[in-house]
Image (cartoon, rainbow, N blue to C red):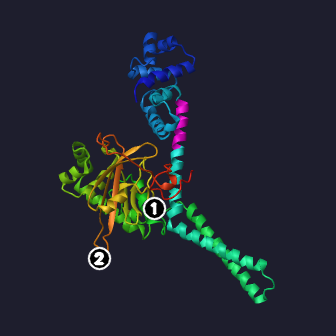
């Protein structure tokens, strides 16, 4: 963040405390003219002078330096990009943060809350629409309600009903009501239960939670954490073994240095390290946060569109249970196995990401059956990979239900916020 904010914040704080420039300058041992230059951002400030001014104004030195406001400016910039219809003054964000830090923090907090709620809505919509447990449970609830309504209708409208038949209807009504109550309770328990590591939880959620907890760089000894249910353990084991193999053949430090020299190009890197393109894609997406490497998200799917592994980013809040936007190259890659695709996506927020997608066979097929393929897509909005020759962006979204592009020809379901 530019140092211009330091002078602006000093001036605002001094005026709030009703101090004159002369009084503040005298108390910190500098001339009033020099303080005037600082406050109007014509002179830098650091060291003893910064400490003295912060002390006199009742602030921490970090409250005046650029680091204190970097997060605010980034958050407000992202919020402005996502709400361009409001036409915010992008070139005056730094001035706004410097002059009104309290309002800036308030808006930043509201923006974060909005983003979290949008991601939660996306996840809930995805789960409600595609989770097999929810689908089956809702079917059972509707079936029980239909049976109860039918039985109750007979009892209410029929004339004389023999006693034995009347008793049967009442017993059926009682049994259906009890099943409805039990099924509804299961649904409530499912959504109230936050611990997805229990046996019976969707293995995809367990795998996602494990990798997200470790920032996609697992500890050296992760075996004890595989106790996550019989269905999830094999999946976790497979992904861990893959990561360890890649880490052993291409250590993060060496890979980061080499990738920077070779322009982060997967094809060039695969040739340099004499390995497969798929290995390079996973290596690029699973780098330690402190490696100085561009941040890449990742999604791996099978031919049904089911998500096998995911690493979301602020630009792409990936689905957990279902397929995402049909325009994503991760699905198009199934039509060209072994051919890496390079595309750019422009999201409704205005964010652009560079995408690499590749599909490969998983295991051995059988005679007369189609090959079993898995497709992987990595993506990044880092300026180091968004080169000048970026492909013409594809206007895409996250999922049709939360995508505001109402006239998209690939739309499958209506926009729920319409």
Closer to the camera in the image, 297 or 16: 297
Q: Residue at x 45, y 17 (%)?
A: 40
Q: Residue at x 27, y 56 (%)?
A: 340
How many angstroms separate mark 1 from mark 2 (CA)? 27 Å
Query: Which quarter of the figure has residue 246?
Result: bottom left
Closer to the camera in the image, 195 or 379: 379
Q: Indicate which disc, 1 or 2, sits on the residue closer to the N terminus.
A: 1
On screen, residue 229 above or below 273: below
Closer to the camera in the image, 200 or 277: 277
| Residue 322, numbered circle | 1
Q: Does 307 appear in magenta?
A: no
Number of numbered discs overlaid on the protein picture: 2
Image position, residue 11 (x, y; %): 50, 19
Q: Circle 1 sits in a helix, a strand or a loop, which is it?
A: loop
| Residue 366, numbered circle | 2
Query: Which quarter of the figure has residue 335?
Result: bottom left
Q: Circle 2 sits in a helix, a strand or a loop, which is it?
A: loop
Q: Point out the stretch of residues depicted in magenta.
A: 101-112
Closer to the camera in the image, 336 or 10: 336
Quarter of the rendering occupied by the N terminus: top left
Image position, residue 118 (x, y; %): 52, 49
How dense is the environment of label 1, judged by Cα within 10 Å: few (below 14), some, or many (20 and up)? some
Left or right: where 150 falls relative to 236: right
Image position, residue 228 (x, y; %): 43, 65
Query: Which quarter of the figure has residue 326?
Result: bottom left
| Residue 148, numbered circle | none
Image position, residue 111 (x, y; %): 52, 41
Q: Residue at x 55, y 18 (%)?
A: 15
């Amino acid at each position: 963040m530019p140092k211009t904010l330091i002078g602006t914040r000093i001036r605002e704080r001094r005026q709030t405390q009703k101090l004159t420039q002369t009084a503040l300058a005298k108390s910190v041992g500098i001339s009033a003219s020099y303080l005037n230059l600082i406050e109007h951002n014509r002179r830098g400030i650091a060291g003893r002078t910064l400490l003295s001014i912060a002390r006199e104004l009742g602030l921490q030195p970090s409250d005046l330096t650029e680091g204190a406001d970097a997060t605010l400016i980034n958050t407000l910039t992202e919020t402005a990009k996502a709400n361009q219809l409001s036409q915010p003054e992008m070139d005056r964000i730094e001035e706004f943060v410097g002059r009104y830090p309290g309002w800036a923090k308030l808006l930043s907090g509201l923006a974060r809350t909005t983003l979290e709620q949008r991601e939660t809505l996306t996840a809930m919509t995805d789960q409600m629409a595609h989770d097999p447990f929810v689908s089956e449970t809702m079917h059972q609830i509707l079936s029980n309600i239909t049976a109860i309504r039918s039985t109750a209708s007979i009892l209410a409208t029929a004339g004389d009903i023999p006693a034995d038949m009347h008793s049967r209807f009442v017993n059926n009504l009682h049994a259906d009501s009890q099943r409805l109550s039990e099924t509804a309770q299961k649904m409530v328990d499912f959504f109230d239960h936050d611990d997805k590591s229990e046996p019976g939880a969707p293995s995809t959620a367990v795998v996602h939670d494990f990798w997200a907890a470790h920032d996609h760089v697992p500890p050296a000894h992760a075996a004890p954490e595989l106790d996550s249910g019989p269905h999830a353990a094999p999946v976790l084991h497979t992904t861990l073994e893959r990561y360890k193999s890649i880490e052993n053949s291409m250590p993060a430090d060496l890979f980061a240095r080499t990738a920077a020299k070779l322009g982060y190009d997967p094809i060039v890197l695969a040739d340099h390290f004499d390995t497969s393109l798929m290995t390079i894609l996973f290596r690029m997406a699973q780098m330690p946060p402190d490696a100085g490497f561009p941040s890449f998200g990742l999604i791996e799917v099978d031919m049904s569109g089911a998500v096998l592994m995911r690493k979301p980013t602020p630009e792409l809040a990936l689905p957990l249970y279902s397929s995402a936007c049909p325009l994503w190259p991760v699905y198009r890659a199934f039509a060209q196995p072994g051919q890496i695709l390079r595309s750019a996506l422009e999201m409704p927020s205005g964010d652009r990401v560079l995408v690499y997608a590749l599909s490969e066979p998983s295991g051995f097929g059988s005679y007369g059956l189609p090959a079993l393929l898995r497709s992987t897509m990595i993506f990044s909005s880092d300026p180091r990979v968004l080169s000048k020759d970026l492909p013409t962006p594809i206007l895409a979204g996250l999922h049709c239900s939360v995508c505001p592009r109402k006239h998209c020809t690939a739309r499958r379901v209506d926009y729920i916020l319409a």
